Image (cartoon, rainbow, N blue to C red):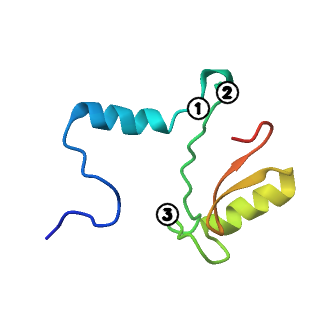
Amino acid sequence: MAGTPSGLGDVITDTRQLVAYLDSGSKPEDQWSIGTEHEKFVFLRDGLAAPGYDGPNGIRALLEGLAAEYGWTPVLEGDHPIALTRGKAR
């Protein structure tokens, strides 16, 4: 059973609070830029199953290999690469 989160700040009870919270994470207009994002679906050749994150055939190995091969910069969540970028970093 879910409960009210603790230690995460105030509970949002009003649309204005939600708008203010989302707006607080926005960049100033002079820092806006346009970019693209590409979603890729990855399947293992043997059986066409989706790979896990870790292991020699996992998403981490794929991202690290592409970064090494093409000089792309990993986007990290903690110490986990979750995406790659090149050019202007976010």
Residue 11 horizontal side relative to residue 52, left or right: left
Tell us which disc is closer to us: 2 or 3. Answer: 2
Q: Secondary structure at mark 2?
A: helix
Whole-Å distance between the Cαs marked 2 and 3? 37 Å
Helix, strand or loop at disc 1?
loop
Q: Are marks 3 and 1 in contact (CB under 8 Å)?
A: no
- 30 sits to left or right of 25: right
Viewer-side label of 3, 1: 1
Q: In the rendered view, does 48 fall on the left or right side of 88? A: left
46 over 25 or under it: above or below: below
Determine the image quadrant of residue 9. Answer: bottom left
Q: What residue sits right under mark 3 in the picture?
A: 50
User: Label 3 near label 2: C-beta < 8 Å?
Assistant: no
| Residue ID at (77%, 56%) | 66
Tags 2 and 1 touching, CB below 8 Å: yes
| Residue pointed to by mark 1 | 27
